[in-house]
Image (cartoon, grey):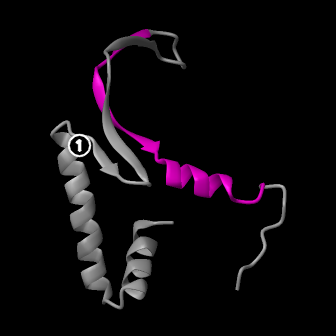
Amino acid sequence: MTKADLIEGLANKLAMNKGEAEKAVNVMLDDVIGALKQGERVNISGFGTFSVSTRQARTGRNPKTGESIQISASRSAKFKPGKQLKDSLNDMPDASEPATSTN
């Protein structure tokens, strides 16, 4: 699923035009990003929690040359799925079983 798919689904389910749906998605994403930039955790109950992880500076190795290089410290977003999301994924049929339509 892409951002465009998410916007289209939101527009269809809430009977709004795509411009309004795009604005809603962008506002939500901007708020999540803004909170993470402030060092806050973003908890969407049942879905999961976004947080910032800090990676320490470290020495790495260039795989082509074998040369040691210094890798700078960096921050990254982490996501921990919530119970409702995990439970819904575990209720899915195994990948080896054919999916059945619920239409």
In the picture, measured across the screen, residue 65 lies left or right of residue 6, that is: right
| 29 falls in the magenta region | no
Query: Which kind of residue does numbered mark 1 sit on?
Result: Leu
Within 10 Å of disc 1 (Cα), the crowding (few <14, some 14-19, many 20+) is: some
**28 and 73: which is toward the camera:** 28
Q: Nearer the viewer, residue 58 or 99?
A: 99
Compared across the picture, whether 55 is left or right of 9 comes to left
**Location of residue 15 in the rendering, given as x and y in whole percent from the top left corner:** 36, 91
Location of residue 27 in the rendering, given as x and y in whole percent from the top left corner: 21, 66
Q: Which residue is mark 1?
A: 36
Q: Quadrant of the C terminus?
A: bottom right
Q: Quadrant of residue 64?
A: top right
The quadrant where residue 92 appears: bottom right
For the record, the magenta segment spans 68-94
Q: How many marks?
A: 1
**Measuring 51% from the left and 66% from the top, which residue is drawn there?**
1
> Is 73 within the magenta?
yes
Image point 44% across, 79% down: which residue? 9
Side (left or right) of 3 relative to 33: right
Residue 23 to residue 68: above or below: below
59, above or below 72, in the image: above
Whole-percent x, y for residue 62 in the image? 48, 17
The quadrant holding residue 53 is top left
What residue is rendered at 37% in x and 45% in y?
Answer: 49
Is label 1 in a helix, a strand or a loop? helix
4 to 60, vertically: above or below: below
Q: In the rendered view, tell whether residue 50 sits above or below residue 58.
A: below
Residue sticking out furthest to the left = 38
Percent x, y of residue 74: 29, 27
